[in-house]
Image: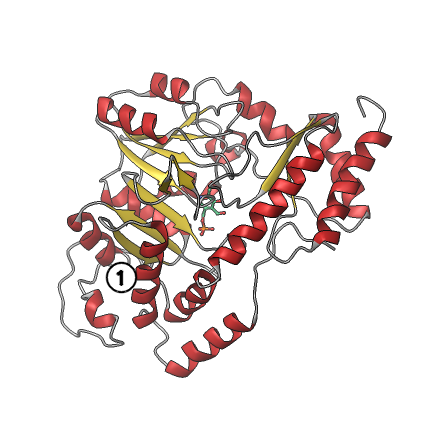
Amino acid sequence: MIPVFRPLITDDEFSAAHEALEMGWLGMGSYVGEFEAELKRLIGADDRYVCAVSTGHAALHLALMVIGAGAGDEIITPSFNNVADFQAILAVGADPVFCDIDERTLCIDLDKAEALITRRTKAMIVMDYDCILCDHDRIAEMAKKHGIRVIHDAAHSLGSSYRGKPVGSFSDITMFSFDPVKTVTCIDGGALVVKTEEEFRQIREMRLVGMGQPAEVMYQNQRAWTYDVRHLGYRYHMANMHARLGLAQLGKFDRISTSRRETARFYNAKLADVQGVRTPDTDFEGITPFLYYIRVAAEKRDGLRAFMRERDIDTGIHWQPGHWFTLFKDCRHGELSVTDRVGHEILSLPLHSCMDEDDRQRVVDAVVEYFSAVPAGK
Ligand SMILES: Cc1ncc(COP(=O)(O)O)c(C=O)c1O
């Protein structure tokens, strides 16, 4: 079976895990500090602060906490987004407001988003859907004009650049995920990039159940036994072993990025002209793709998935839109016609760094075969 996702785990990660266990300091320690420094270097965020946490979801929750989002506030987000974003909004007591996406980019539709802004709007969570990034310049302008904060969900866009600037180096607040299937994995992990020292200090405390333990002490594999507690907090810090694995992954980021981009380009070249298949409208320049999606007619998607499965090729669905879920069905929203359509059409094909040329070709052959064999409308 060719899986949709597969982390690139080599001897580096086995040695990394061994090293971390041998060190014996399993909680937050020196490797977490090193991971933050290495991530900061990768994203070129020299004038920003990077804080590693336990998951991308935790990062989103802390981002909303640090901007003071709470009861009575609305957070605008595309409905075509990860459940973690919606749950983080509920976790601070705020209300998600669902916005539609742009037909070409599958990122938030900024005209529709602007129309949803009210006096209650505290922030927008914008998300780069895979290989095409949001219009971040316009997002920054809109945020300034309306006095709202921006949380940039960059779970899909680590290592990509927007107009020559690395993702993570330019947004108000940026969040990353290093979950088991992400471009870089820590098994589980996340990070926030913030602009001010004050927000950085708060996030550092909030990730440690509010304990004002100086990270500088913990990064020497030591603990301060006396400290103050100033903020509500959660046990959201990153553990040393996870950070060590993340360091091993960052050490081969070029290999990970190049292999993913090559496969995505191969798919685009081979599938763009297949009738019935819509491929991402990008040449992947400056992009490290997290997933590779195609869009097919809604009534063909299940048939294609079954056809691929029979050929031992897995596919995925990213995602079901938020407003389709019971918990979120009553949230305020704008017109969501693109989201509703894309939610039925989207299909992820295998994309990871463990694929060889045969694997890619098998995926392409299966898609081509399905669309040349299947009668129209089936
Ligand atoms: C766009 C997006 N945001 C947030 C998350 C949540 O990250 P995590 O799984 O690390 O909690 C994910 C995870 O898949 C994601 O794809």
Give the residue at x 47% y 57%: 253
Counting labels gives 1
Locate residue 259 relative to residue 222 in the image: left or right: right
Locate residue 260 relative to residue 359 in the image: left or right: left
Which color scheme is applied? secondary structure
Does mark 1 have its CB less than 8 Å from ligand 1?
no
Q: Position of residue 194 (x, y in %)?
A: 25, 46
Q: Front-most of 238 and 97?
A: 238
**Label 1 secondary element:** loop
Q: Amino acid at mark 1?
A: Leu
Whether residue 188 is visible: yes
**Is 184 located above or below residue 283 in the figure?**
below
Q: Front-most of 232 and 295?
A: 295
Give the residue at x 39% y 22%: 110
**Is 77 located above or below residue 208 in the figure?**
above
Locate residue 352 relative to residue 62 in the image: left or right: right
Q: Position of residue 196 (x, y in %)?
A: 18, 46
Tell me the quarter of the image containing the C terminus: top right
**Is 169 located above or below residue 343 in the figure?**
below
Give the residue at x 57% y 44%: 291
Whether residue 237 is visible: no
Which quadrant of the view contains residue 190? bottom left
The residue pinned by badge 1 equals 208
Q: Position of residue 207 (x, y in %)?
A: 28, 57
Q: Position of residue 32 (x, y in %)?
A: 33, 66
Count neighbours of disc 1 (C-alpha within 10 A) and say few if under 14, some if 14 to 19, many if 20 or more.
Answer: many
Locate residue 343 relative to residue 271 in the image: left or right: left
Give the residue at x 44% y 64%: 251
Tell me the quarter of the image containing the N terminus: bottom right
